[in-house]
Image: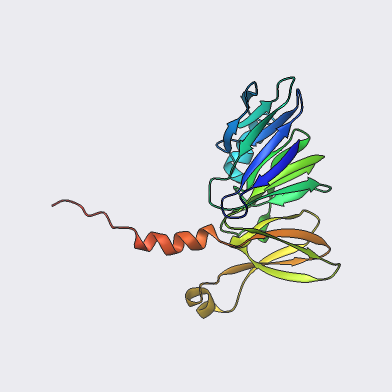
C-alpha cells in the first residue's frame, strides 16, 4: 500500500494506492471514494468476540471494510469524521491508539482493545481501554486538528492533556494523574494529564474534542416543554 496525504492539516484526505489484488482494511464510515474495479467486503475482523471487544471497549466499529484492488490496481480515498489531520505510521513495534483515531491499515496489522487500568481511567476519550495495533505494515491514524509527533530519549519525560493524546508506543511507561488542586480542576479548564517517559514516541492533536464539546453544549438552545 502506498499512502498519499492531501490537503493537510485541517481537512486531510488519504489516497491509498493498491497494486493488483492487494487488500486494505478501512474503518467503517471512513471511505470517501474508490476507483473502478475495487471491491468491498464487510467483515468482523478477528472474529465475533474480538470485534465486539474492540467496538464496546475500544470505541471502534464492530464491522470493518476490506477493499481489494483489481488486477490493474486501484485506489481508495479515506478521511476522518472530524476536521483534522491524518498520519501514516510504519509499524516497528506495537502502538496504543486513543478511541476513534484508527482509519485504515495493511492487512498485516492486528487490532484489539487493551486494558489500561487506572493508567487510562481518567482519559475522557479512551475510557478504560485503548486500541492496540500490532504487526507489520502501515497504519493510518486521524486527529481532531493537526498532529504533532514527539520523541523522548531514555529517562526523558513529558506531560500531555489526556484529551490531546493520539497514539503512543506500547513500551513507553505512562501514568495518568490530576493536575493541580481542586481549584485548578474546577476552574482552570485543566483536569487530567498523562505523564510519559522515554524512550519512545507519541502523537498529540492540536485540538481536543472534549474541550470543544464543553464549549459547544452550553451554547445549544434548550428545548422547552409545551404547557
Q: Residue at x 73, y 25 (%)?
A: 73
Q: Whole-percent x and y of residue 155? A: 84, 70
Whether residue 213 sits left or right of residue 67 in the image: it is left
Quadrant position of residue 177: bottom right
**Towards the viewer: 198 or 137:** 137
Q: Could you tell me how many numbered marks the image carries?
A: 0
**Towards the viewer: 178 or 86:** 86
Is any atom of residue 192 visible in this view? yes
Whether residue 163 sits left or right of residue 75 in the image: it is left
Q: Residue at x 56, y 58 (%)?
A: 124
Colour mapping used in the image: rainbow
Q: Quadrant of the N terminus?
A: top right
Task: Specify the farthest residue to the right.
Answer: 154
Quadrant position of residue 193: bottom right
Whether residue 16 sits left or right of residue 191 in the image: it is right
The correct choice, above or below, for 76 with respect to 209 in the image is above
Q: Whole-percent x and y of residue 56? A: 57, 41
Q: Residue at x 85, y 67 (%)?
A: 153
Q: Whole-percent x and y of residue 160? A: 66, 67
The correct choice, above or below, for 107 with respect to 114 in the image is above
Q: Whole-percent x and y of residue 138? A: 76, 42
Task: Specify the farthest residue to the left.
Answer: 227
**Towards the viewer: 136 or 132:** 136
Is any atom of residue 122 visible in this view? no
Q: Residue at x 20, y 52 (%)?
A: 225
Amino acid at each position: 500500500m502506498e499512502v498519499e496525504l492531501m490537503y493537510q492539516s485541517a481537512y486531510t484526505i488519504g489516497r491509498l494506492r493498491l497494486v493488483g489484488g492487494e487488500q486494505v482494511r478501512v474503518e467503517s464510515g471512513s471511505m470517501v471514494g474508490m476507483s473502478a474495479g475495487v471491491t468491498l467486503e464487510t467483515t468482523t475482523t478477528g472474529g465475533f468476540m474480538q470485534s465486539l471487544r474492540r467496538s464496546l471497549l475500544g470505541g471502534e466499529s464492530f464491522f470493518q471494510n476490506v477493499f481489494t484492488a483489481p488486477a490493474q490496481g486501484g485506489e481508495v480515498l479515506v478521511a476522518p469524521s472530524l476536521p483534522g489531520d491524518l498520519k501514516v505510521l510504519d509499524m516497528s513495534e506495537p502502538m496504543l491508539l486513543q478511541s476513534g483515531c484508527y482509519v485504515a491499515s495493511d492487512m498485516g496489522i492486528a487490532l484489539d482493545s487493551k486494558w489500561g487500568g487506572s493508567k487510562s481511567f481518567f482519559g475522557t476519550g479512551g475510557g478504560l481501554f485503548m486500541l492496540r495495533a500490532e504487526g507489520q505494515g502501515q497504519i493510518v491514524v486521524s486527529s481532531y486538528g493537526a498532529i504533532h509527533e514527539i520523541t523522548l530519549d531514555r529517562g526523558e519525560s513529558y506531560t500531555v492533556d489526556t484529551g490531546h493524546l493520539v497514539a503512543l508506543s506500547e513500551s513507553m511507561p505512562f501514568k495518568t494523574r490530576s493536575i493541580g488542586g481542586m481549584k485548578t480542576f474546577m476552574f482552570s479548564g485543566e483536569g487530567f494529564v498523562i505523564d510519559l517517559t522515554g524512550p519512545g514516541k507519541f502523537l498529540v492533536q492540536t485540538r481536543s474534542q472534549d474541550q470543544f464539546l464543553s464549549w459547544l453544549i452550553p451554547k445549544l438552545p434548550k428545548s422547552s416543554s409545551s404547557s
